[in-house]
Image (spheres, helix red, strand yellow):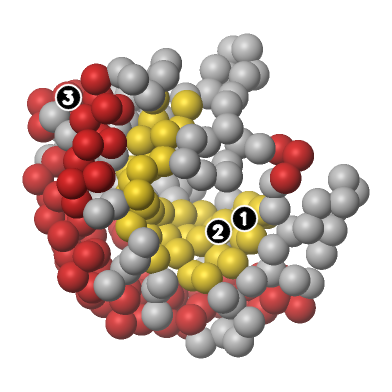
């Protein structure tokens, strides 16, 4: 499948929920946002229909996102349904890691290939401030559980405001190096000016070579 700019589209990202168990300062206001009614949220059956249609058009990579996808009830069942679809070469999921200690093994058994985990600092107090109450120890347990479950490679998504030499980014990089994780630095977009940057350590943000569709 090619778009009007002759870019080959083979990657489908699907948001399974708008809900999240954190309130990161750059993502949403402290009081949260109005949630989509459950009756309007995309169903597992609709997701499977979309993916199966996408496969016929050249999609072979699928990523499950949110919100926080692990708060969606029955998420391992969805992964099992997707992994059974012939033609998917890469099935991945992005999470904040808070619930990963519980879900890593069930997701791996269901057929998930790999995982990305959002982590902007390894300092517990800074993490608590950035996420408005998050417990970083749960993320560390989740990373360990993902490694034990074989969800490799494990990629860490680190949002930075300026450059990767900032203290938090440098500490995340060192943590990843020590623990056999791959780090990707994602520069925070300036919504007022409409500016963004290419992901360092990944392929995101390169519009001329974008290969993905998003289902919200």
Judge from the rendering whether residue 147 lies leftward or rightward of residue 210; answer left or right: left
Cα–Cα span, label 2 and label 1: 5 Å
Q: Residue at x 34, y 66 (%)?
A: 152
The residue drawn where x is 71% and y is 38% is 207
Q: Are marks 3 and 1 in contact (CB under 8 Å)?
A: no
Are the residues flagged by discs 2 and 1 in contact, CB closer than 8 Å?
A: yes
Neighbor class of circle 2 (other Cα within 10 Å; few <14, some 14-19, many 20+) is many
**Placement of 110 over or under 212, stated as above or below:** below
Badge 3 or badge 1: first in the primary sequence:
3
Q: In this figure, which residue is indicated by the disc labeled 3?
A: 126
Image quadrant in which the N terminus is located: bottom right
- Residue with the mark numbered 2: 14
> What's the CA distance linking mark 2 and mark 3?
30 Å
Q: Taking 106 as reference, is 139 above or below it?
A: above
Secondary structure found at label 3: helix
Residue depicted at 57% across the width and 19% down the height: 191
Name which of mark 2 and mark 3 comes first in the sequence: 2
Quarter of the figure with residue 157: top left
Camera-side residue of 181 and 116 = 181
In the image, residue 202 sits, relative to residue 170, either above or below, namely below
Q: Secondary structure at mark 2?
A: strand
> Of callouts 2 and 1, which one flags the residue occurring earlier in the amino acid sequence?
2
Q: Nearer the viewer, residue 126 or 207?
A: 207
Disc ID at residue 215:
1
Q: Which mark is residue 59?
A: none
Q: Is residue 126 left or right of residue 50?
A: left
Tell me the quarter of the picture where residue 154 sits: bottom left
């Amino acid at each position: 499948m090619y778009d009007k700019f002759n870019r080959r589209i083979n990657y489908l990202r699907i948001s399974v929920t708008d809900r999240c168990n954190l309130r990161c300062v750059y993502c949403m206001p402290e009081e949260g946002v109005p949630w989509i009614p459950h009756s309007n949220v995309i169903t597992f059956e609709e997701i499977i229909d979309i993916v199966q249609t996408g496969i016929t058009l050249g999609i072979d990579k699928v990523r499950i996102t949110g919100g926080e996808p692990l708060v969606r009830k029955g998420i391992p069942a969805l992964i099992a349904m997707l992994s059974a679809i012939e033609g998917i070469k890469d099935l991945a999921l992005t999470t904040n890691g808070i619930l990963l200690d519980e879900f890593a093994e069930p997701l791996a058994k269901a057929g998930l290939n790999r995982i990305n985990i959002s982590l902007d600092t390894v300092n517990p107090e800074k993490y608590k401030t950035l996420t408005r109450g998050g417990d970083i120890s749960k993320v560390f347990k989740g990373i360990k559980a993902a490694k034990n479950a074989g969800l490799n490679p494990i990629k860490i998504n680190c949002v930075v405001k300026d450059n990767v030499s900032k203290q938090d980014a440098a500490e995340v990089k060192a943590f990843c190096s020590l623990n056999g994780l791959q780090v990707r630095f994602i520069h925070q977009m300036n919504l007022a000016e409409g500016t963004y940057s290419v992901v360092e350590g990944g392929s995101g943000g390169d519009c001329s070579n974008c290969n993905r569709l998003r289902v919200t």
